[in-house]
């Protein structure tokens, strides 16, 4: 199975792609790698970070779509009610905007770096937005 390397500031995470459950989502995301941008605290979803993307995925269907990801289950939101982006749960999370619950495609799961998830939350809260790089090694 394929994996992603995700660097957020000095923190490094390895995520396994959910290729069987979300094949098209994984394919579309891999086309964009390496992705570089910012990740910030998601104000509406609880203990989660949000990496906005500067593109949308209007033709991407829902696959392996969830609203209540576990810690480390990464979601790709294709755009619509809010901008497209990646939700990165580091604690208790319900994916939503100010008014309603949203769903995103669970495309990858953190398999290495779990111990740094609390540090990610701390950095976002006290230092603000962090640089993020998502690479397909």
Image (tube, helix red, strand yellow):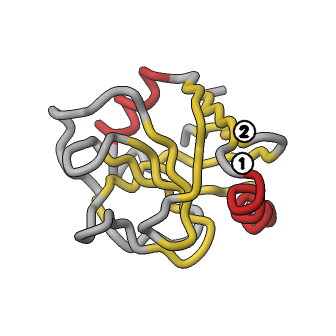
Quick one: quadrant of the N terminus? top right
Q: Residue at x 26, y 70 (%)?
A: 101
Q: Position of residue 21 (x, y in %)?
A: 34, 53
Q: Give the residue at the far bottom of this rendering.
A: 92
Residue under label 2 = 7
Q: Residue at x 65, y 36 (%)?
A: 132
Secondary structure under the numbered disc 1 in the rendered image? strand
Residue 102 occupies quadrant: bottom left
Mark 2 against mark 1, which lies toward the viewer? 2
Quick one: quadrant of the C terminus? top right
Residue 8 occupies quadrant: top right
Gap in angstroms between the C-alphas marked 2 and 1: 6 Å
**Residue 37 badge:** none
Q: Residues within 10 Å of mark 1 (few under 14, many from 20)?
A: many
From this view, report whether residue 18 is shown above or below residue 46. above
Secondary structure under the numbered disc 2 in the rendered image? strand
Q: Position of residue 6 (x, y in %)?
A: 66, 40
Mark 2 and mark 1 residues within 8 Å of each other at the beta carbon: yes
Residue under label 1 = 13
Q: Residues within 10 Å of mark 2 (few under 14, many from 20)?
A: some
Q: Give the residue at the far right of this rendering.
A: 10
Q: Position of residue 40 (x, y in %)?
A: 58, 50
Disc 2 or 1, which lies upstream in sequence?
Answer: 2
Q: Position of residue 45 (x, y in %)?
A: 44, 68
Q: Residue at x 76, y 60 (%)?
A: 126
Counting the numbered discs, the total is 2
Using residue 113 as the reference point, say whether residue 88 is left or right of it: left
From this view, report whether residue 5 is shown above or below residue 36. below
């Amino acid at each position: 199975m394929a994996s992603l390397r995700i660097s957020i500031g000095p923190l490094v995470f390895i995520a396994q792609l959910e290729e069987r459950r979300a094949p098209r989502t994984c394919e579309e995301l891999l086309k964009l790698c390496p992705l570089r941008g910012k990740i910030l605290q998601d104000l509406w979803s609880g203990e989660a970070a949000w990496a906005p993307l500067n593109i949308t995925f209007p033709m991407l269907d829902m696959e392996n779509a969830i609203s209540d990801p576990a810690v480390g289950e990464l979601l790709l939101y294709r755009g619509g009610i809010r901008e497209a982006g990646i939700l990165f749960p580091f604690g208790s999370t319900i994916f939503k905007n100010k008014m309603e619950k949203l769903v995103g495609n669970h495309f990858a799961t953190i398999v290495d770096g779990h111990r740094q998830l609390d540090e990610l939350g701390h950095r976002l809260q006290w230092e603000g937005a962090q640089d993020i790089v998502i690479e397909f090694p």
